Image (cartoon, grey):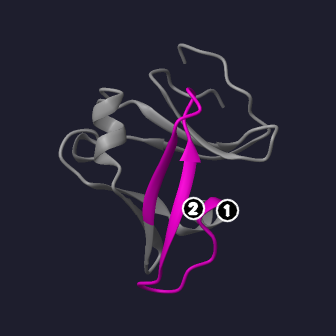
Amino acid sequence: MDQEFDCAVVYYIKQLSPSDAASSKQIKLPKTEARRFCGDLRHKQRSMVTVLDHRQVSWEFLCTCYGCQYALSRVAVFCNSYQLRAGQYLLFYKDNMQRLCMDRSVILPAG
């Protein structure tokens, strides 16, 4: 990443696909990982999720459960704002103040 961040727990690392980064208005996340920060939702149930980025700007996404995966909608503005491309990563994590955060990375995560 091009900046340091305050991270207590990493919830999920999502590699962006070509449609995630360019045209899609939503990204798909595995249910097991996404429920850690989106909550436990039943099929087609929705919940709003608020996250902070590395600049402490608040972003609000709509999370919907579809069977074994969750979809985060309204992500296109975030991707466009940071000019994200396919192959880059979104990190979902909790900071040391227990706030849900999302950051982007251009490097492959270790491990």
Secondary structure beneath disc 2? helix
Vertical arrangement, residue 81 with respect to residue 9, above or below = above
**Kind of residue indicated by mark 2:** Ala
Secondary structure beneath disc 1? helix
Would residue 95 appear left or right of 35 to someone viewing this image? right
Which x, y percent locates residue 35?
A: 61, 67
Would residue 5 appear left or right of 65 to someone viewing this image? right
* Quadrant placement of the C terminus: top right
- Asked which quadrant contains residue 9, the reply is top right
Residue drawn at x 74%, y 39% is: 95
Residue drawn at x 49%, y 21% is: 107
- Nearer to the camera, 58 or 43: 58
Residue 80 visible, this angle: yes
Q: Kindly indicate whether the residue at mark 1 contacts the one at mark 2 (C-beta within 8 angstroms).
A: yes
Which x, y percent locates residue 109?
A: 58, 28
Residue carrying label 2:
34
Residue 86 visible, this angle: no
Residue carrying label 1:
36
- Nearer to the camera, 24 or 110: 24
Q: Which residues are magenta?
A: 37-62
Task: Residue 108: say if magenta.
Answer: no
Residue that extends furthest to the top in the rendered view of this protein: 2
Vertical arrangement, residue 46 with respect to residue 27, above or below = below
- Nearer to the camera, 53 or 72: 53
**Kind of residue indicated by mark 1:** Arg
Residue drawn at x 40%, y 30% is: 88
